Image: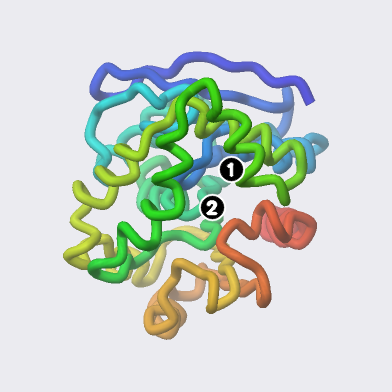
Amino acid sequence: MASMTRSIALPDGETTTLETWGTSGPILLCVHGIASSRASWKRTADALADTYRVCAYDQRGHGDSASIWGPMTLDQSVADCTAVADAIGEPVRALVGHSWGGAVALLAGPKIATASVVAIDPMIHQAPGRWYDDFVHDLESLLATPAERRVDAVRTAFASLPAVEIDAKIHALRNMSIRPIVRLGEQNRADMGLWDLRIELRRYPLPLLLLLADAAESVVLAEDLWIINETLGPNATIEVFEGEGHTLHRTAFDRYIASLKSFLA
Protein backbone atom coordinates (compact mmCIF):
# COMPACT_ATOMS: atom_id res chain seq x y z
CA MET A 1 0.00 0.00 0.00
CA ALA A 2 1.22 3.49 -0.82
CA SER A 3 1.94 5.85 2.04
CA MET A 4 2.66 9.51 2.67
CA THR A 5 5.40 10.94 4.90
CA ARG A 6 5.95 14.32 6.50
CA SER A 7 8.21 15.89 9.10
CA ILE A 8 6.86 16.57 12.58
CA ALA A 9 8.45 18.99 15.03
CA LEU A 10 9.14 17.56 18.49
CA PRO A 11 9.00 19.65 21.71
CA ASP A 12 12.76 20.27 21.88
CA GLY A 13 13.10 21.39 18.27
CA GLU A 14 14.12 18.02 16.86
CA THR A 15 12.05 16.48 14.07
CA THR A 16 10.74 13.03 13.29
CA THR A 17 9.05 11.48 10.28
CA LEU A 18 5.37 10.56 10.37
CA GLU A 19 4.17 7.99 7.86
CA THR A 20 0.49 7.45 7.07
CA TRP A 21 -0.97 4.51 5.21
CA GLY A 22 -4.52 4.81 3.86
CA THR A 23 -6.68 7.78 2.95
CA SER A 24 -9.90 7.29 4.92
CA GLY A 25 -11.23 5.92 8.18
CA PRO A 26 -10.36 6.47 11.84
CA ILE A 27 -6.72 6.99 12.78
CA LEU A 28 -4.53 4.49 14.61
CA LEU A 29 -1.27 5.98 15.90
CA CYS A 30 1.43 3.33 16.34
CA VAL A 31 4.57 3.51 18.48
CA HIS A 32 7.41 1.06 17.85
CA GLY A 33 9.77 -0.54 20.34
CA ILE A 34 13.53 -0.84 20.73
CA ALA A 35 15.45 -1.61 17.51
CA SER A 36 12.37 -1.01 15.35
CA SER A 37 10.95 1.96 13.46
CA ARG A 38 7.76 3.23 11.90
CA ALA A 39 8.28 0.71 9.08
CA SER A 40 7.45 -2.11 11.50
CA TRP A 41 3.75 -1.16 11.22
CA LYS A 42 3.42 -1.58 7.45
CA ARG A 43 1.90 -5.07 7.70
CA THR A 44 -0.59 -3.79 10.25
CA ALA A 45 -1.49 -0.95 7.89
CA ASP A 46 -1.95 -3.33 4.96
CA ALA A 47 -4.21 -5.60 7.01
CA LEU A 48 -6.40 -2.69 8.17
CA ALA A 49 -6.45 -0.77 4.89
CA ASP A 50 -10.19 -1.15 4.34
CA THR A 51 -11.10 0.33 7.71
CA TYR A 52 -8.40 2.56 9.21
CA ARG A 53 -5.64 5.02 8.48
CA VAL A 54 -2.49 3.84 10.22
CA CYS A 55 0.06 6.46 11.29
CA ALA A 56 3.50 5.72 12.75
CA TYR A 57 6.63 7.71 13.52
CA ASP A 58 10.28 7.02 14.32
CA GLN A 59 11.13 7.28 18.00
CA ARG A 60 14.40 8.94 18.97
CA GLY A 61 17.54 7.11 17.93
CA HIS A 62 15.71 4.82 15.50
CA GLY A 63 14.98 4.78 11.76
CA ASP A 64 15.15 8.22 10.21
CA SER A 65 15.42 9.72 13.71
CA ALA A 66 18.69 7.91 14.42
CA SER A 67 20.56 11.21 14.64
CA ILE A 68 18.39 12.73 17.39
CA TRP A 69 20.42 13.32 20.55
CA GLY A 70 17.73 14.62 22.89
CA PRO A 71 16.69 12.98 26.16
CA MET A 72 15.63 9.33 26.16
CA THR A 73 13.42 9.52 29.24
CA LEU A 74 9.89 8.14 29.20
CA ASP A 75 8.67 11.67 29.87
CA GLN A 76 10.35 12.80 26.65
CA SER A 77 8.98 9.81 24.73
CA VAL A 78 5.47 10.65 25.90
CA ALA A 79 5.95 14.33 25.00
CA ASP A 80 7.09 13.26 21.52
CA CYS A 81 4.03 11.04 21.11
CA THR A 82 1.75 13.84 22.23
CA ALA A 83 3.39 16.24 19.75
CA VAL A 84 2.86 13.77 16.91
CA ALA A 85 -0.80 13.27 17.87
CA ASP A 86 -1.30 17.04 18.01
CA ALA A 87 0.32 17.45 14.59
CA ILE A 88 -2.04 14.86 13.06
CA GLY A 89 -4.83 17.23 14.03
CA GLU A 90 -7.61 14.62 14.14
CA PRO A 91 -8.97 12.32 16.85
CA VAL A 92 -6.91 9.18 17.40
CA ARG A 93 -9.14 6.11 17.51
CA ALA A 94 -6.46 4.00 19.17
CA LEU A 95 -2.86 4.36 20.30
CA VAL A 96 -0.99 1.12 19.58
CA GLY A 97 2.46 0.44 21.01
CA HIS A 98 4.92 -2.43 21.29
CA SER A 99 7.45 -2.97 24.11
CA TRP A 100 9.06 0.44 24.85
CA GLY A 101 6.38 1.87 22.56
CA GLY A 102 3.77 0.01 24.60
CA ALA A 103 4.96 1.83 27.71
CA VAL A 104 4.77 5.12 25.81
CA ALA A 105 1.25 4.31 24.59
CA LEU A 106 0.06 3.46 28.10
CA LEU A 107 1.37 6.74 29.50
CA ALA A 108 0.42 8.93 26.53
CA GLY A 109 -3.09 7.55 25.97
CA PRO A 110 -4.85 9.64 28.64
CA LYS A 111 -2.85 12.73 27.67
CA ILE A 112 -3.90 12.73 24.01
CA ALA A 113 -7.49 11.68 24.74
CA THR A 114 -7.35 8.69 22.43
CA ALA A 115 -10.46 6.52 22.44
CA SER A 116 -8.49 3.38 23.40
CA VAL A 117 -5.01 1.90 23.85
CA VAL A 118 -3.47 -1.34 22.62
CA ALA A 119 -0.20 -2.37 24.32
CA ILE A 120 1.70 -5.29 22.79
CA ASP A 121 3.92 -6.94 25.41
CA PRO A 122 4.69 -3.53 26.94
CA MET A 123 7.65 -2.75 29.19
CA ILE A 124 5.67 -2.17 32.37
CA HIS A 125 8.30 -2.95 35.01
CA GLN A 126 11.96 -3.62 34.28
CA ALA A 127 13.82 -5.97 36.62
CA PRO A 128 16.67 -4.12 38.40
CA GLY A 129 20.15 -4.78 37.05
CA ARG A 130 18.95 -6.49 33.87
CA TRP A 131 18.96 -3.75 31.22
CA TYR A 132 22.25 -4.70 29.54
CA ASP A 133 21.46 -8.41 29.35
CA ASP A 134 17.86 -7.88 28.26
CA PHE A 135 18.21 -5.11 25.67
CA VAL A 136 21.83 -4.22 24.89
CA HIS A 137 23.81 -7.46 24.71
CA ASP A 138 22.05 -9.04 21.71
CA LEU A 139 22.27 -5.88 19.59
CA GLU A 140 25.69 -4.55 20.53
CA SER A 141 27.73 -6.44 17.96
CA LEU A 142 25.16 -5.96 15.18
CA LEU A 143 25.07 -2.19 15.71
CA ALA A 144 28.86 -2.08 15.74
CA THR A 145 28.92 -3.46 12.18
CA PRO A 146 30.37 -0.88 9.75
CA ALA A 147 27.87 0.95 7.56
CA GLU A 148 28.98 -0.78 4.36
CA ARG A 149 28.18 -4.20 5.86
CA ARG A 150 25.23 -3.24 8.06
CA VAL A 151 22.39 -4.15 5.67
CA ASP A 152 23.77 -7.62 5.01
CA ALA A 153 24.30 -8.15 8.73
CA VAL A 154 20.70 -7.17 9.48
CA ARG A 155 19.39 -9.48 6.75
CA THR A 156 21.37 -12.36 8.23
CA ALA A 157 20.32 -11.64 11.82
CA PHE A 158 16.62 -11.53 10.96
CA ALA A 159 16.55 -14.04 8.11
CA SER A 160 13.66 -15.99 9.65
CA LEU A 161 11.25 -13.04 9.38
CA PRO A 162 9.02 -12.29 6.38
CA ALA A 163 10.60 -10.03 3.76
CA VAL A 164 8.47 -7.03 4.77
CA GLU A 165 9.72 -7.35 8.35
CA ILE A 166 13.35 -7.68 7.25
CA ASP A 167 12.96 -4.47 5.26
CA ALA A 168 11.51 -2.82 8.37
CA LYS A 169 14.50 -3.95 10.44
CA ILE A 170 16.89 -2.54 7.85
CA HIS A 171 15.07 0.78 8.02
CA ALA A 172 15.28 0.78 11.81
CA LEU A 173 18.90 -0.29 12.18
CA ARG A 174 20.74 0.96 9.09
CA ASN A 175 21.98 4.16 10.79
CA MET A 176 21.39 3.30 14.43
CA SER A 177 23.98 2.97 17.20
CA ILE A 178 23.73 1.19 20.53
CA ARG A 179 23.82 4.49 22.43
CA PRO A 180 20.06 5.26 22.42
CA ILE A 181 19.30 1.86 23.97
CA VAL A 182 21.96 2.33 26.65
CA ARG A 183 20.69 5.84 27.39
CA LEU A 184 17.08 4.66 27.49
CA GLY A 185 18.01 2.40 30.39
CA GLU A 186 20.28 4.93 32.09
CA GLN A 187 18.02 7.96 31.88
CA ASN A 188 14.99 6.02 33.12
CA ARG A 189 17.12 4.43 35.88
CA ALA A 190 15.94 1.00 34.85
CA ASP A 191 18.73 -0.80 36.70
CA MET A 192 17.50 0.83 39.91
CA GLY A 193 14.04 -0.60 39.35
CA LEU A 194 12.53 2.79 38.49
CA TRP A 195 11.13 1.77 35.10
CA ASP A 196 7.81 0.95 36.76
CA LEU A 197 4.38 1.74 35.34
CA ARG A 198 2.39 -0.42 37.74
CA ILE A 199 0.97 2.53 39.67
CA GLU A 200 -0.08 4.30 36.46
CA LEU A 201 -1.99 1.18 35.41
CA ARG A 202 -4.24 1.10 38.47
CA ARG A 203 -7.84 1.54 37.32
CA TYR A 204 -6.65 2.49 33.85
CA PRO A 205 -9.05 5.17 32.56
CA LEU A 206 -9.32 4.09 28.90
CA PRO A 207 -10.42 0.91 27.13
CA LEU A 208 -7.20 -1.09 27.03
CA LEU A 209 -6.14 -4.25 25.22
CA LEU A 210 -2.99 -5.90 26.60
CA LEU A 211 -1.56 -8.51 24.25
CA LEU A 212 1.12 -10.44 26.10
CA ALA A 213 3.74 -12.93 24.94
CA ASP A 214 4.14 -16.33 26.54
CA ALA A 215 5.30 -16.03 30.15
CA ALA A 216 8.70 -17.49 29.25
CA GLU A 217 9.28 -14.80 26.58
CA SER A 218 7.35 -11.76 27.82
CA VAL A 219 8.94 -8.57 29.15
CA VAL A 220 6.02 -8.40 31.59
CA LEU A 221 7.47 -10.00 34.70
CA ALA A 222 5.61 -13.07 35.91
CA GLU A 223 5.46 -11.71 39.44
CA ASP A 224 3.82 -8.52 38.14
CA LEU A 225 1.12 -10.15 36.03
CA TRP A 226 -1.05 -10.91 39.08
CA ILE A 227 -0.75 -7.30 40.27
CA ILE A 228 -1.65 -6.02 36.81
CA ASN A 229 -4.67 -8.31 36.58
CA GLU A 230 -5.92 -7.17 39.98
CA THR A 231 -5.45 -3.43 39.53
CA LEU A 232 -6.14 -2.57 35.88
CA GLY A 233 -9.88 -2.28 36.38
CA PRO A 234 -12.90 -3.06 34.19
CA ASN A 235 -11.68 -1.18 31.10
CA ALA A 236 -8.88 -3.68 30.45
CA THR A 237 -8.76 -6.88 28.44
CA ILE A 238 -5.68 -9.12 28.71
CA GLU A 239 -4.85 -11.79 26.14
CA VAL A 240 -1.81 -14.04 26.55
CA PHE A 241 -0.35 -15.56 23.37
CA GLU A 242 0.87 -18.91 24.67
CA GLY A 243 3.97 -20.14 22.88
CA GLU A 244 4.65 -16.76 21.25
CA GLY A 245 7.58 -14.42 21.79
CA HIS A 246 7.95 -10.74 22.57
CA THR A 247 7.39 -9.55 18.97
CA LEU A 248 4.08 -11.36 18.64
CA HIS A 249 2.77 -8.69 16.24
CA ARG A 250 5.36 -10.10 13.82
CA THR A 251 5.49 -13.80 14.63
CA ALA A 252 1.79 -14.33 15.47
CA PHE A 253 0.56 -11.77 12.98
CA ASP A 254 -2.79 -13.30 11.99
CA ARG A 255 -3.90 -13.83 15.58
CA TYR A 256 -2.67 -10.37 16.56
CA ILE A 257 -4.63 -8.74 13.75
CA ALA A 258 -7.76 -10.69 14.64
CA SER A 259 -7.51 -9.57 18.27
CA LEU A 260 -6.83 -5.98 17.25
CA LYS A 261 -9.80 -5.87 14.86
CA SER A 262 -12.14 -7.40 17.42
CA PHE A 263 -11.10 -4.92 20.11
CA LEU A 264 -11.36 -1.89 17.84
CA ALA A 265 -14.79 -2.98 16.61
Please give the name of the residue rendered at 38% of the width and 64% of the height, measured from the top-left corner. Answer: 124
In the rendered image, which quarter is residue 205 located in?
bottom left
Of the 4 image quadrants, the one containing the N terminus is top right
Residue 12 is situated, as x and y percent measured from the top left of the image, at: 24, 23
Please give the name of the residue rendered at 72% of the width and 60% of the height, measured from the top-left corner. Answer: 252
Please give the name of the residue rendered at 54% of the width and 52% of the height, measured from the top-left corner. Answer: 116
Please give the name of the residue rendered at 61% of the width and 74% of the height, measured from the top-left corner. Answer: 240
Q: Is residue 87 visible?
A: no
Kindly identify the amino acid type of the residue bearing the numbered disc 1. Arg
Q: Nearer the viewer, residue 189 or 163?
A: 163
Q: Which mark is residue 214?
A: none
The residue labelled by disc 1 is 93
Q: Earlier in the sequence, mark 2 or mark 1?
A: 1
Residue 162 is situated, as x and y percent measured from the top left of the image, at: 76, 44
Label 1 sits on a secondary structure element that is strand
Question: In this image, 237 relative to 136: left or right?
Answer: right
Kindly identify the amino acid type of the residue bearing the numbered disc 2. Ser
Label 2 sits on a secondary structure element that is loop
The coloring applied to the image is rainbow
Q: Is residue 247 above or below residue 199?
A: above
Q: Is residue 236 visible?
A: yes
Question: In this image, 151 relative to 195: left or right?
Answer: right
> Are the two marked residues, 2 and 1, in contact with CB atoms closer than 8 angstroms?
yes
Q: Which mark is residue 116?
A: 2
How dense is the environment of label 2, judged by Cα within 10 Å: few (below 14), some, or many (20 and up)?
Answer: many
Q: Is residue 125 above or below residue 145?
A: below
Q: Is residue 17 above or below residue 193?
A: above
In the rendered image, which quarter is residue 239 located in?
bottom right
